[in-house]
Amino acid sequence: MYAVFETFSVKSALLLAVSTLIIYLIVSWLFKKTPDKLPPGPREWNTNWEILKATWTDSFVELTYEWAKKYGPLTFVYSLGQPLLLINCPETGRKLFAADEYKLLLADRYTNEASRLAWYNGKDLIFSKYDDVMRKKRKLFHSTLRLYGDGVQKFENVALEEMQRMFAEIDAAGGADFDLSATLSRSLKIIIYILALGERPSDPAIPDILEEYDIAFNKLWAPDMDFVISNIRILTKVPGKYKTAVDRLLKAKRAAEELMYFNPKKTHIPGQPRGIADLWFDQANLPGNEWMRHDPEHVIAVLTSIFFAAHLTSRSLLLGVFLCMMNYPNIAKKIQEEVDTVVGSRSPRLDNRRDMPYTEATILESLRLISQSPLSGVRTASEDIHFQGMVIPKNTLVYINTGYIFRSEKYYDDPWTFKPERFLDSQGQLLPVDHPARRNLIPFGVGVRTCPGESFARSRGFLFLTSILQRYDILPPAHEKMVPADFTVKDEAVAGFVRQCVRYKCRLIRREARKD
Ligand code: HEM
């Protein structure tokens, strides 16, 4: 009975939604006052159909790649009535996001349906408008990261201690086929958990609660969900795929908030911060921060969104790097040589980075090829923007098309091959930051909303890569085919706004114990 009702409801709702959409598109097409000088882009009668098809088949990123080849530095399109601008050129991205003339006009983000549900209408750090409160939050976030983040002894110790636990897990596999994705992902979650809450989880599975929230959010934010539910909200109430995804998010949200906010709040002693959460609780008590004290939703949203921002992006990078190491053993070997020479048998430290250009180049190359946020930036035009003789209309959603930039012949030779050397000079030193190869690599964005976790993410990548390769050789699995380092593969585990790495198995053999 319920199934009949469900089928009927889904069908009727979809019919209603599609008819409403068609009427809306016709009316908006008839009445829309289109500015004369829009940037180039597809305007064909079937463009919306192409977009719907692409979002449905999880190939919107590929569609934007083709548009970039056809239209040059900018692609402008009305996507289901929503103006959308894709920036396909790094210099154009810099001008629009970082030049004084435009940067504040493109500093806002948009509150989509996923962020409305998860983070109290944009009280988080990622989706909020660029207003006074947002700027205060960004400043606070930077200062908490400085205390507990990159380069600080405490961070190194947390990471290195957790790695000992991870090594024990790897050693227990005894060189047999091993799911490195699960192990790396667990370690990463534990490290972020300790930084956030200041203590090791009593059970290593506890941070999985936060992972569930992150994945539920990431899936809702993917174009196939986001475009539909943000335009046709009613679908989130009708039994079916969209409601299931929303219910999953709301359920995970309660558990994540308990873990990140309500539990640590109960045991927080003012002035004695254990981790990032306590630092925010202390801040809320300071004069001038009444906005946080009077509305706890700000701190709740910030804490859970930080976990999301730090976790899925870094996880995708780390899993991708090791997938590349298995596929390109010569590169792994060069890193091992660098580790042996510079670090020796001690634990790698962040200050070793400056003497390890090949390893640094490998991390840059991984960020390029993996391109885990192929559409990055996610800004909105707060007014009509006049740019190089064109008009970007108010409310246009603007993305930097890094999926295209990082993997197009125009910016990188042989873009689908993993080649750390492209970031090195003839002496094997890292190219200067103003060299085109490095200037074009903008995985952390540009301008006033760039990623505040960049050095944190890169330093963690360095510690994991060097610590694991110092100890182990990474080899293909013995009992199944090696998964190739192809970051365009589609499957359920990969899908989401932040693209994840496919699951893979490998063998990790202790270097001194290797026989062949
Ligand atoms: C490989 C890892 C990472 C990548 C590729 C990445 C990428 C990005 C990108 C592209 C943006 C948007 C930038 C823009 O609009 O210009 C962003 C924003 C953000 N990232 Fe990251 N990120 C990573 C890791 C992290 C980590 C580890 C943290 C936290 C410790 C973090 C926290 C944030 C936050 C809070 C924002 C929102 C900033 C704002 O809107 O003002 N990210 N990230």
Image (cartoon, helix red, strand yellow):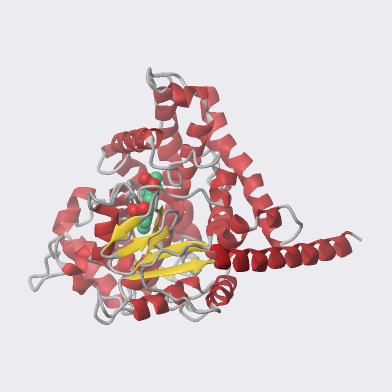
Residue in view at x 36 percent, y 81 percent: 70
User: Looking at the picture, does residue 3 appear above or below residue 211?
Assistant: below
- Location of residue 215 by image quarter: bottom right
Q: Quadrant of the N terminus?
A: bottom right
In this view, the residue in front, 465 or 402, is 402
Residue in view at x 59 percent, y 54 percent: 216
Report the number of discs: 0
In this view, the residue in front, 51 or 341, is 51
Residue in view at x 57 percent, y 67 percent: 30
**Residue lying farthest left?**
427
How far across and down, in percent of the image, does residue 332 sit? Answer: 28, 71
In the picture, measured across the screen, residue 431 lies left or right of residue 374, that is left
How far across and down, in percent of the image, does residue 395 sit? Answer: 45, 54
In the picture, measured across the screen, residue 201 lies left or right of residue 139, that is right
Q: Quadrant of the C terminus?
A: bottom left
How far across and down, in percent of the image, does residue 355 sit? Answer: 14, 57
How far across and down, in percent of the image, does residue 230 sit? Answer: 59, 55
In the picture, measured across the screen, residue 388 lies left or right of residue 188, that is left
In the picture, measured across the screen, residue 153 lies left or right of residue 200, that is left
Query: Residue 80: in sight, yes or no?
Result: no
